Amino acid sequence: MLNYTTHLHKDSTTWVTFVHGAGGSSSIWFKQVREFTKHFNVLLLDLRGHGNSKPSLKRVFSEKYDFDSITHDIVEVIDHLKIEKSHFIGISLGTVLIRNLAEKYPRKVESMVMGGAIMKLDVRFKFLMGFGRVFKNIIPYLWLYRFFTFIIMPDSNHRESRSVLVREAKKLYQKEFVKWFRLSSQINPLLRFFRAVDLKIPTLYVMGGEDYLFLPSVKKVVQRQSTSSLLLIEHCGHVVNVEQSKLFNDVVIQYVADMSS
């Protein structure tokens, strides 16, 4: 089972589950935990191979890696804790996992908050993935990861986000990184399906105005989905919960409270 941490609220029955992205860990929510635990029960997860979710060598080299199995990891924790329904907050690739969870287990999802959401891969990102597939077994993974974070978050005000993600990525190792990287070959058909299907689950997209690779597609998705809305944060990049934590916290806490009432 994944490593997880819970923070229980003495009065609230509302659960919020945080899902990080590839290369990160539950530590990337360090600017959220204090504020959210004032209002809700909070579940923090480390995805497999990340943070303290270190599988045995047998699991690392034999267990199937695909979006459904990784999504099931999350559901396994939720079921273990007997959480019937939760609000889910994700960042980057974590939003893909949340959207997949909502597709497979809609009754477990109260609402979705998608920070730096990935809903379509543009030409630049596809080039990055192709470059990574060629060199992933040759170049040290941390070099590739640093390069990717710089391409996705190139501006000087994105420096803290890059540093946070690289710090967490150091806890991975090459073979684990390669397994996660192979997921990129599965993501396009999945995202195409997500864009076409409106689950009618309340969804708040929180995007930085400088999230150059992913913002255009999210704007189009919000226009087509009946229960979706977009918070656009100017002068902010991909990792919105780090770069603009106060605004992120204030808006998302209010959103979750409204969806719970």
Image (cartoon, rainbow, N blue to C red):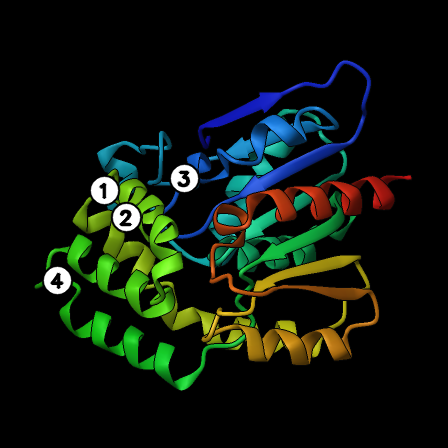
Classify mark 2: residues with Cα within 10 Å, few (<14), some (14-19) or many (20+): some
Q: Position of residue 6 (x, y in %)?
A: 59, 23
Q: Earlier in the sequence, mark 1 or mark 4?
A: 4
From the image, tell me which residue sits under label 3: 25
Q: CA distance from mark 1 to mark 3?
A: 11 Å
Residue 12 vs 224, above or below: the answer is above
Residue 18 vs 224, above or below: the answer is above
Q: Would residue 155 be found to the left or right of residue 206 on screen?
A: left
Judged from this view, the residue extending furthest toward the left is 138
From the image, tell me which residue sits under label 1: 170
From the image, tell me which residue sits under label 4: 137
User: Mark 2 or mark 1, which is nearer to you?
Assistant: 2
Classify mark 4: residues with Cα within 10 Å, few (<14), some (14-19) or many (20+): few
From the image, tell me which residue sits under label 2: 166
Q: Would residue 21 be found to the left or right of residue 85 on screen?
A: left
Q: Earlier in the sequence, mark 2 or mark 4?
A: 4
The amino acid sitting under disc 2 is: Val
